[in-house]
Image (cartoon, helix red, strand yellow):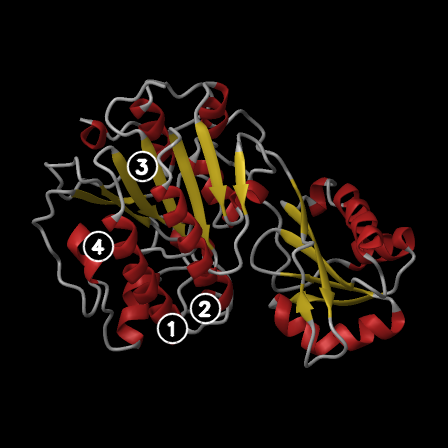
Amino acid sequence: MNYKKYKRVFLIVADSAGIGEEPDAALFDDVGTNTWAHTAEAVGGLDVPVMESMGIGELADIKGVKPVHDHPNAFSMRLREMSNGKDTMTGHWEMMGVYTTKPFVTFTDTGFPKELMDELEARTGHKLIGNYSSSGTEILVKLGEEQKRDNSLIVYTSADSVLQIAAHEETTGVKELYRCCEIAREICMKPEWYLGRIIARPFVGEDKNSFKRTPNRHDYALSPSVKTDMDILKDNGYMTSCVGKISDIFNGAGVTKTVKTVSNMDGMDKTIEQVKNDEWTGMCFVNLVEFDSEYGHRRNPQGYAKALEEFDVRLGELIKVMREDDVLMITADHGNDPTYKGTDHTREKVPFLVYSPSIKNGKYLEEGASFGDIGATILDNFGLAVESPLIGSIIKEINE
């Protein structure tokens, strides 16, 4: 395996931790949003010494965080999103070079159209209940007992382009739930209902006080429309280990290893395990979803702040076991300002912090034009090139 400087790349996405409005934020009704800064302001300041030492304070005015300019082992910069959208798939795909011009359809504020629901009900043979945006755990409390009693299907969405179906494993059965989700996937290939993902959400338990989701979740996602940077790595024999929901986001494309997680801390545990295992070369691509799912969408700045501080502690643990030829990259896929109106994602730039013991000339870098700069820089480290029509420019300082 060839590499210029780093044998292993650890790319961690703090899901939704944006750092200020994009130039076109007005088109998304997101003017003035800043997930990092407003979270800090809401709690009187953040305590994130590890990321502070990497230069996060240079990227925005973050209460409690000093703008450290002397960080020789780390680069700090912001990246803009070139694609049209502010959802999970669009952001992650762009990191791996995919330029999305038409955003995926979302039904966050309205629920799914009657025509879609009628067709899904007729073809599955189940009564449908729900049909609104909700947390997956909260909707089980509200509708789980009704679903279990009637063998109906709980249909719900989120701020992402997704249709989720929840059903009890004993009442409905996992196989039947999967069958219904396959029908939903077929229906939602229509242009007017073109959703990024259909997700089966089986659960167990006797009543609303004991319902819990099971590991039998199954995603029916769209694959990227083109070969991605991750495919290029895999095709050239490099490891592409995906921690969290990364494999689901890419529908398995370009993935050599999948590691499921149940929380941010579990994700960090499993990432640190991979740092300690030196028997591979390539990329470990990590998504930590709770920033977004538990605190951003629920407009909970206190929870968001606590999650950022806990993440910072775990980064300190990870850094201690890194090798000289490892590199750590920390970024986000969009914003989700927990102090903003509504419950939707926010159209924001993202931070990009790059740390390695072997970096000696770390500094603040000018803003990048695309999340695709991440994938292009990773490919360059392994002596590979971005292939058309993928986007992204190499951040040369990182690999020098």
- Answer yes or no: do the residues labelled 4 and 3 have beta carbons within 8 Å? no
The quarter of the rendered structure image containing the N terminus is top left
Q: Residues within 10 Å of mark 3 (few under 14, many from 20)?
A: some
SS for callout 3: loop
Q: Which residue is mark 1?
A: 301
**What x and y, as percent, mark residue 131?**
73, 65
Q: Please give the label number shown on residue 323.
A: none
**Earlier residue among tags 1 and 4:** 4
The image quadrant of residue 167 is: bottom right
Above or below residue 301? Residue 380 is above
As shown in the figure, which amino acid type bears the numbered disc 3?
Ala
The crowding category of the residue bearing disc 2, from other C-alpha atoms within 10 Å (few below 14, some 14 to 19, many at least 20), is many
Residue, disc 3 = 369
* Position of 279 relative to 54 (above/below): above
Q: Earlier in the sequence, mark 2 or mark 3?
A: 2
View extreme (bottom): residue: 209
Residue 295, labelled with which disc?
2
Q: Which residue is mark 4?
A: 56
Q: Closest to the observer: 53 or 340? A: 53
Front label number (2 vs 3): 2
Q: Residue at x 74, y 68 (%)?
A: 204
